[in-house]
Image: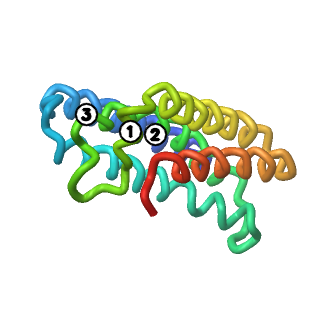
Amino acid sequence: MTDLMTRRFSFLSLTSASLLAGLLLSTTVSADSTEDAIQYRQSVFHTLAWQFSPMGAMVKGKQDYDADEFQTRAERLALLAQLPWEGFIAGSYDGDTDALSKIDTDKTGFEKHAQALMDQSQTLSEVAATQDFAKIRVQFAATAKTCKSCHQEYRAD
């Protein structure tokens, strides 16, 4: 099996496992379990960062650019960006979280930021497939900016 095929197989396995885990969590975590909701969304965001950080290092020249690795991570990011939002339930802004209660009072604004991250991550995945590093850098910056703007509005740092 070629390296690219191995990566694709690994990505498909990760995708299947992620979807299965999401389905299991959605059926086992009750909507009123605020600690579970906080843990769920934080776990997804940590996993997003795990994918995002090496891409950032490549874009900044701190790590050698590997087109296949970048594309794989961008594909994972696009998938993961769809997941954390169900973990933002009413009452889950107290406790061990940096999420602000403004999320509850500004649902429309928060949903726009969530959609922007999903859209930008998907676009990053598509641009990564072109292996045009100049375009990748621009789209990576746009995706990072989307993350930062949401943090500025809805996260206590």
**Label pair 1/2, CB-CB below 8 angstroms:** yes
Q: Provide the secondary structure element on which disc 1 rests.
A: helix
Disc 1 crowd rating (10 Å Cα; few below 14, some 14-19, many 20+) is some
**Label pair 1/3, CB-CB below 8 angstroms:** no
Q: How many marks?
A: 3
Q: Is 8 left or right of 128, judged from the image as shown?
A: left
- Nearer-N-terminus badge (2/3): 2
Q: Which residue is painted at 84% across and 45% down in the image?
A: 135
Compute the Cα span from label 1 to label 3: 14 Å
* Three-letter amino acid code of the residue under disc 1: Pro
* Three-letter amino acid code of the residue under disc 3: Ala
What residue sits right under mark 1 in the picture? 84
When asked about the image quadrant of residue 21, the answer is top left
What residue sits right under mark 3 in the picture? 90
Expressed as whole percent of the image width and height from the top left, the position of residue 132 reads 84, 46
Q: Nearer the viewer, residue 125 or 115?
A: 115
Q: Give the number of the disc on residue 80.
A: 2
Which dot, 1 or 3, sits closer to the camera?
3
Q: Nearer the viewer, residue 100 or 36?
A: 100
Q: Provide the secondary structure element on which disc 2 rests.
A: helix
Q: Which residue is painted at 17% across and 29% down in the image?
A: 31
* Three-letter amino acid code of the residue under disc 2: Leu
Compute the Cα span from label 1 to label 2: 8 Å
Compute the Cα span from label 2 to label 3: 22 Å
Expressed as whole percent of the image width and height from the top left, the position of residue 83 reads 40, 35
Disc 2 crowd rating (10 Å Cα; few below 14, some 14-19, many 20+) is many
- Nearer-N-terminus badge (1/3): 1
Q: How is the image coloured?
A: rainbow
Q: Which residue is painted at 25% across and 27% down in the image?
A: 23
Quarter of the C terminus within the rendering:
bottom left
